[in-house]
Amino acid sequence: MSVVEARGLRKTFGTTTALDGIDLRVEEGRILGLVGPNGAGKSTALNAILGLTAFQGELRVLGRDPWTERDQLMRDVAFIADVAVLPRWIRVSQALDYLAGVHPRFDRSKAEVFLAKTDIKRTSKVRELSKGMVTQLHLALVMAIDAKLLVLDEPTLGLDILVRKQFYDSLLNEYFDRGRTIVVTTHQIDEIQEVLTDVMFINRGRIVFGCSMEDFETRYLEVMVNPQNLAAARALGPIHERHVFGRSILLFDRVDRQHLAALGEIRTPGIADLFVAVMGSEKDNLNTAGQAQGAAR
Amino acid sequence: MNPPSNGVREFPVDAQKLVSAPLTETRPMYWSVRRELWENRSVYLAPLIVTAVVLFASLINTSINVNRMRKLPAIERPSLHSALARPFDMAPAPIMFATLLVGLFYSLDALYGERRDRSILFWKSLPVSDRTVVLSKALIPLVVLPLIALALSVVTQVILLWLGTLVLVTSGMSPAALWSEVHFFQGLLIMPYGLFAHILWFAPIYCWLLLISSWARRAPVLWALLPLLAISALEKIAFGTMHFMSVLTYRMSGAMTEAFAFTGTSKSDGNVDRLSQLDPIRFLSAPGLWVGLACAAAFLAAAIRLRRNREPI
């Protein structure tokens, strides 16, 4: 059984289409990164998975319909929807009490162990904590839940790089194992490239690209081309070309490694670079489609 | 308040399944109500403050009247007995009124505040159903606040009675007069009856406010009141009638008129001090009660449905 399985997932708000028929399958033990521009439909997709919004089409999360069975589903799913959603009035000790009270899979001692490594006092209210500490607290609460699926929607937005790095380190070292699955969206995608097992691009409510990181590393190569080889490199059909300090960097899909090594320095591209390439060609496709439509009239 | 036993985890798996069935409903409810009290400390602080003020005022009354009695010859003292007993009868009213008021403000903010501060996203990440959340919030004005009001009223009366007796005895006067003036034991029946008659009668008001607080994107106070005023004005202008307004005023005052029998003189002072004035049969057979409770249930059901797809605002 897949952890998340969606077919033809659609969601419209009035006349705007937030999700335009998404097919998605996330297997156990994967860490999937969802990447997309603002308003692409990432959060809507996650909200549908978490039972926060109604949807059309088929969607099963751990075998359940999230919209009608949110409360049962949340025994096995944990999520951090955003920074700063912890109620500001709650005390750290009250948050622990409450979770221990309502959550059958919350292990208070795990949260205590994690909190002991921070400067967070048990008697503090959330409003007295710094933004980074609130994130640590939320992470401590979530990591103490023995969940099968963890959903993170921009969990580190607005935090400094040290806290962001700590966040993902703790998550990987102390929480993740093969029995768990993580779905994460973030704008700082390159920071978690090493962490992901799969990546998916979403734009205008559609999934425009998806592959495992193993495939990603074998398929895509970036070459900083020596100027004299530029024409030869372009002949190999790069999917994207950009310029840095007067040098051309070409991105190739499924082109022989040795072949490229002869043309310049090669390296695995960042997800963000591929994202720019894919989004750029998306735009071109849309433009040509529009022109074709115009010509047909 | 001790939390229910946390030992479930230690049972073997099969036993755990058996035990968790009844717990799944009551445990989240218990903790949700506690959560409400953590967040809304005014639920118990406001009635406590009012109680303190009432006690302080009563203390002044007692000291003034006992001084006056001392100066009077023994034969004229009974004229002051009713003045001495006055705070005793009056004490519960402000306490109960304060809790009714706290309940109104609480209900109007209960499902609105969690969306405004975005914490709804945290609460929804936990295995607590929307039904449990909305019902736990409804329990505050409908059960918790009335119980607080009742407890504080009884405690206040006990303190006043004890204090009055003490002052009289230490001043060398008999407390018997005070005891004959106050209706302590009758009050122990009248107060809960009156209180719960009011709560049942006002239930649709609290549930209406909860519904508005789960629906409004801003200014829930306005949304709670304006539609009612608009319908009244519309009716008055269009048909020249005031039926809707009379429904509203009946809702405000109906608990008193339906639950108690006022005859002759006692109606003029509006006080209830005799058990014979209690009229539970008429109250329970009043259609207004049942229509109101049906509305309350409908409002709550709507609020539960609404919370399902509510997002931060």
Image (cartoon, grey):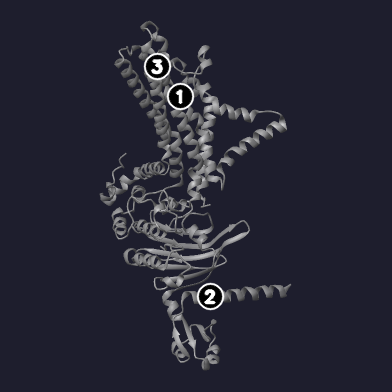
Residue at left 35%, top 45%?
A: B21
On the image, numbered disc 2 is attached to which residue?
A: A276
User: Residue B292, image x and y in percent?
Assistant: 53, 31
On the image, numbered disc 3 is attached to which residue?
A: B65
Where, by quadrant of the figure, is residue A242 drawn?
A: bottom right
Observer-nearest of A229 and A136? A136
SS category of the residue bearing label 3: helix
Where, by quadrant of the figure, is residue B172 drawn?
A: top left
Observer-nearest of B230 and B279? B230
Front of the two marks 3 and 2: 3
User: Residue B40, image x and y in percent?
Assistant: 43, 42
Residue furthest to the top: B75
On the image, numbered disc 1 is attached to which residue?
A: B194
User: Residue B60, image x and y in percent?
Assistant: 40, 23
Q: Chain of mark 2?
A: A
Q: CA distance from mark 1 to mark 2?
A: 70 Å
